[in-house]
Amino acid sequence: MSVQQTIQDIVNSHKVVLFMKGDKRFPQCGFSARAVQILQASGCEEFHTVNVLMDEGIRQGIKEYANWPTIPQLYVNGEFLGGSDIMLEMFEAGELQSALAE
């Protein structure tokens, strides 16, 4: 199976997926930590994380998958929403909470 197919399967298998450095219990960069905090502040307790540091193929492949150069990356209902900066903007506008509630 290709890396892109693996990523597609992960994204389609979970309502909320955060590709990040580390995991939700132990983020390994500030942006990933902020993304986890934003999700939790949005009331989202159930989300799947993928530690890109554990697989170089996924670490590079996720950037191509969404055509987005940075990590973390958030997917909700199979749709790419953005990285931590966009997540914060969406949270402040109430849009992230709405997306998570769908």
Image: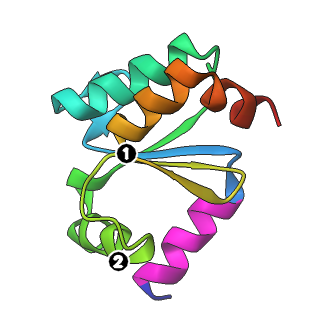
Q: Residue at x 58, y 72 (%)?
A: 8
Name the dominant secondary structure of the magenta segment. Answer: helix
Residue 31, above or below 91: below
Of the numbered discs in the image, which one, if any, rests on residue 83?
A: 1
**Residue 7 counted in the magenta span:** yes
Residue 9 image-quadrant placement: bottom right
Residue under circle 2? 64
Q: Residue furthest front?
A: 93
Specify whether residue 58 is painted magenta. Answer: no
Q: What segment carries the magenta color?
A: 3-12
Element type at mark 1: loop
Name the residue: 37% across, 45% down: 83
The earlier-in-sequence mark between 1 and 2 is 2
At x 46%, y 81%, the residue is 4
Disc 1 to disc 2: CB gap under 8 Å: no
Distance between mark 1 and mark 2 Cα atoms: 14 Å
Colour scheme in use: rainbow
**Left or right of residue 7: residue 23:** left
Mark 2: which amino acid?
Answer: Glu
**Vertical relation: 10 (above or below) 76:** below
Q: Nearer the viewer, mark 1 or mark 2?
A: 1
> As drawn, which residue projects farthest toward the left?
29
Which percent across, then down, holds residue 102? 83, 37
Query: Where in the figure is residue 65, as x and y percent of width and height?
Result: 43, 75
Return the residue found at the far right: 102
Q: Secondary structure at mark 2?
A: helix
Along the viewing direction, whichever of 56 and 101 lies nearer the viewer? 101
**In the rendering, which numbered label is found on residue 9?**
none
66 to the left or right of 28:
right
* Amino acid bearing label 1: Gly
Vertical relation: 22 (above or below) 73: above
* Percent of width and height locating residue 6: 51, 74
